[in-house]
Image (cartoon, grey):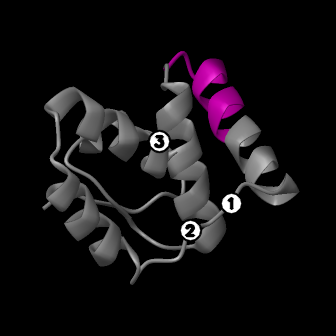
């Protein structure tokens, strides 16, 4: 999901080829985590927990939260309020 959001961001901002290449080079230090059955199950849990509590979460944000929960790592975001009510999720907002 994060890669898809980045792709949309670059299209919307009209990134130059050199900026795209610089970003691609930078991203080589990160591992891409692909969705598997465990990730899909965690996404469903995040979505359902929010529905039951009367909160809403964007589908995209639920994928990002599910990834952090599966990896048992904090989620770094500038949109902490999107993730504030997810049980067990540690959110870092720089």
Label 1 crowd bin: few (<14), some (14–19), many (20+), radius 10 Å: few
> Quadrant where the C terminus lies?
bottom left
Q: Which mark is residue 4?
A: 3
Mark 2 residue crowding within 10 angstroms, few (<14) / some (14–19) / many (20+): few
Q: Residue at x 16, y 34 (%)?
A: 14
Considering every residue shown, the one lying at the far front of the view is 17
**Residue found farthest to the top:** 54
Position of residue 89 measured from the top left corner of the image (x, y, whole percent)? 48, 57
Q: Residue at left 16%, top 58%?
A: 19
| Residue position marked by numbered label 2 in the rendering | 32
**Mark closer to the chain start, 3 or 1:** 3
68 over 1 or under it: above or below: below
Side (left or right) of 47 relative to 25 = right
Q: Based on the displayed image, in which of its 4 quarters is residue 67 positioned?
A: bottom right
Q: Which residue is mark 1?
A: 34
Q: Earlier in the sequence, mark 2 or mark 3?
A: 3
Nearer to me, 89 or 32: 32
Quarter of image, res 5: top left
Which of 73/50 is in front? 73
* Res 27 visible: yes
Which stretch did the figure color magenta? Answer: 46-55
């Amino acid at each position: 999901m994060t890669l898809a959001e980045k792709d949309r961001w670059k299209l919307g901002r009209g990134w130059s080829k050199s900026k795209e290449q610089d970003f691609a080079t930078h991203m080589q230090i990160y591992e891409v985590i692909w969705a598997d059955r465990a990730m899909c199950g965690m996404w469903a849990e995040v979505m359902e927990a929010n529905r039951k509590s009367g909160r809403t979460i964007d589908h995209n944000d639920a994928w990002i939260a599910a990834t952090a929960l599966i990896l048992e790592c904090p989620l770094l975001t500038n949109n902490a309020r999107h993730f504030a009510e997810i049980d067990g999720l540690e959110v870092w907002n720089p």
